[in-house]
Structure formats: structure tokens, C-alpha cells
Image (spheres, rainbow, N blue to C red):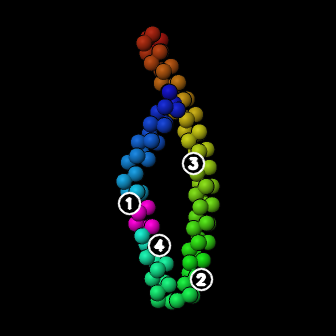
Amino acid sequence: MGQISSLMQVDCFRLSLLPKNFNSIIFITYCLIFSIVFMALVVGLSFLAGFGVLFIVSVINLLISRVTGRYQREIAKATDNRMKITNEVFNNIKFIKVNAWE
């Protein structure tokens, strides 16, 4: 039960972020293409240095995203365990109340 609740919360949150993130992906793609073309037109062949910096930063961002994803999976596992324990406690409280063992 805890895993189902956790997955529903995470999935709903991620689906709510989809429109904003989708727009950002399209916008960033156009900005990168525009900036590379603009650098090539204004600076000439020297734009390759700027393009190299963009490429290196993109690779670093990819590596950081993978590490962050790994930590998020660990957090999700901890949240699942917490939800299981919380649901077990609430079920035991309900059982005690139903049987009037107060």
C-alpha cells in the first residue's frame, strides 16, 4: 500500500510538471541553435571555442543529472518504507478502535 501511494504521488507530481518542462525543452533547443549560429556569424571560426564550452557544460550537466537520479531513486525507496510503516500504524490504530481496546 505504501509503494502504491508513493508512486501515485510522484506520478501525479511529474505529470503536473510535464507542460512546463516540455515547453522548456523546445525553448532550450531553439536557444542553443540560435546561439551557435549567431556565434558563427558574428565571431567566425572562433565560435568553436564557445561551442566547445557549451558541449563540455552539457556533458557535465548529464553526469550531474545521472547522480541526482540515483539519489532520487534512493529517496523514493526510503519514502516507500516510510509510507508502509505509516500505513501499518494507522491500520493498527483502526483495529484497536474497532475492537474498543482503548
Q: CA distance from mark 2 to mark 4?
A: 15 Å
At x 48%, y 37%, the residue is 7
11 up-or-down from 71: above or below: above
How would you rate the neighbour count of disc 1 (Cα within 10 Å): few for under 14, some for 14-19, many for 20 or more? few
Instruction: From the image, tell me which residue sits under label 3.
Output: 72
At x 46%, y 87%, the residue is 41
Dot 1: element: helix
The location of residue 55, given as percent across then percent down, is 59, 72
Lower position in the chain sequence, tag 3 or tag 2: 2
The location of residue 95, given as percent across then percent down, is 47, 15
Lower position in the chain sequence, tag 4 or tag 3: 4
Instruction: From the image, tell me which residue sits under label 1.
Output: 23
Instruction: From the image, tell me which residue sits under label 2.
Output: 49
Q: CA distance from mark 4 to mark 3?
A: 28 Å
Nearer the observer, 89 or 38 = 38
Q: Nearer the viewer, mark 3 or mark 1?
A: 1
96 up-or-down from 74: above or below: above
Outermost residue on the top side: it is 99
At x 48%, y 21%, the residue is 91
The reply to whether residue 86 is visible in this rendering is: no
Nearer the observer, 65 or 41 = 41
Instruction: From the image, tell me which residue sits under label 4.
Output: 32
Lower position in the chain sequence, tag 4 or tag 1: 1
Q: Are marks 3 and 1 in contact (CB under 8 Å)?
A: no
Magenta part of the protein: which range? 24-29
Q: Nearer the viewer, mark 4 or mark 3?
A: 4
The location of residue 93, given as percent across then percent down, is 47, 20
At x 45%, y 41%, the residue is 11
